[in-house]
Image (spheres, rainbow, N blue to C red):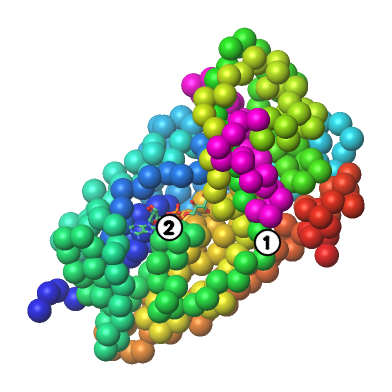
Amino acid sequence: MSQIYDVIILGRGVAGLASAIHLLCSQSGLTIALIGAQPKFRQPQGETLAASAEQELKMLGVWSDFCKKKFPIISQTFSNWGTKKLIPTTYNALSKLGWQVDRDVFYHCFEKKIKKISGQYLCSIMEPILQLKKDNSYWNVITKNTAVMGRILIDCSGRRHVSFRQTSKKNNIDKLCCSYAYLSLNSGIVTPTPGVLIEPVKNGWWYSTLLPNQTMALSYFTDSNLLPKKIGSDIQSIQKILAASNYTRRRIESGGFDWLSTPKICQASTSRLQRFAGNNWLAVGDSAMTLDPLSSHGITTALWSARKAAETILKQNIHLTPFCSDSYHQEMELAFENFLLQKNAIYQMENEFPENIFWKNRRL
Ligand SMILES: Cc1cc2nc3c(=O)[nH]c(=O)nc-3n(C[C@H](O)[C@H](O)[C@H](O)COP(=O)(O)OP(=O)(O)OC[C@H]3O[C@@H](n4cnc5c(N)ncnc54)[C@H](O)[C@@H]3O)c2cc1C
């Protein structure tokens, strides 16, 4: 019979890597199988890591390495959200000071730490998960070349939520999706601001930011049923929506930007599992709840929930007593309710387009 691991972690994004580090650092002697494909990032670059992540990075022991990466500090976000003109929104609820992170470099801090502490307790499998089953209270994971058994499952597989058949259903709160593209800068001058710009428009909002390589990451957020059908194949569709914006259009025009590709589309909805944990399993990060990217709190929440999941496992003897995950479920429940309150308050602030369905749906 193959070895039975104490904990199987599915997914090696932020949530999976952070869960593994917390468990390994505890020196509990728990054996861990960390399974996931090499992360291929399919979201727009130029993400903001909220300032509140600092605490979590310190607790993971990756803070000094993170600082060495010298990610650009986001000192100001400009927006006309809830106002008539563009203003800096450094310390308001829309966006707090943070960093513009490059995911691959960010992951490197975590992988380096894992390498340092893994020893004999970690089995790291970098392969896609093909099948997941639960037999006689053990989890079985099948990848291309391996089969792994484990007692406790931490699902960190992001929006895909690989364990959906065996764990909990997901409730979608909205239909937000994101159409994003990259543009190269020609003139060297970007007005009205080279920083992060968030602009509400009739059917959604624009997010744009200049990356260190002088490329503009441009994202348009709207509901999936409001997205023009051709947007993924035809630059003109997105250009038409852009033409109706004010500040975002002006900054693209000022920089003489060239479109590097047609836009790509990804989901960006707010959603949650009905249960965040259950019989021998916990869901962490986006696998448990996905947050409207306007908050820029997805990564920090993934880090926080990874720590909470590890604490839940570490405070019990998983070999002797039935696994109890109620407190984890309750903490996640509270976190999601708080997030919804904040999200609703932010959307209430914007009232330029009260008759448009995108905004109406968010003012219910
Ligand atoms: C458009 C958009 C913009 C965003 N902007 C921000 C932002 O500015 N700031 C912020 O904090 N957050 C932002 N977020 C949210 C943030 O990206 C997520 O909250 C965060 O990545 C969650 O981390 P995770 O580890 O839970 O999931 P993920 O990062 O999705 O990682 C899941 C991992 O599981 C792996 N996996 C899944 N299925 C399988 C399988 N079958 N086999 C093997 N491996 C598998 C994937 O390859 C991946 O590596 C944004 C989200 C979107 C959609």
**Residue 227 colored in magenta in the image:** yes
Residue bounds of the magenta highlight = 209-236
Check disc 1 and report the residue beneath it. 174
> Is 139 within the magenta?
no
Whether residue 322 sits left or right of residue 284 in the image: it is left
Q: How many labels, in total?
A: 2
Residue occupying image coordinates x 29% and y 69% = 131
Q: Quadrant of residue 23?
A: bottom left
Q: Please state which of the two labelled residues, at mark 2 or mark 1, is closer to the viewer.
A: 1
Say whether marks 2 and 1 touch (CB < 8 Å).
Answer: no
Q: Residues within 10 Å of mark 1 (few under 14, many from 20)?
A: some
Residues at marks 2 and 1, CA–CA distance in whole angstroms: 23 Å
- What's the residue type where badge 1 is placed? Asp
What residue is rendered at 83% in x and 57% in y?
Answer: 360
Residue 352 seen anywhere in this rendered image of the structure: yes
Front residue of 94/353: it is 353
From the viewer's perspective, is 213 left or right of 122?
right
| Residue 208 visible to the viewer | no
- Determine crowd level at label 2: few under 14, some 14-19, many 20+ residues with C-alpha closer than 10 A: many
Which circle's residue, 2 or 1, is located before the other in the chain?
2
Question: Depth check: 225 or 88 in front?
Answer: 225
> Residue 4 placed where, x, y %?
19, 76
From the Cβ of disc 2, is ligand 1 less than 8 Å away? yes
Q: Residue 238, which numbered label?
A: none
Which amino acid type corresponds to the residue marked 2 in the rendered image?
Answer: Ala
Q: Which residue is mark 2?
A: 15
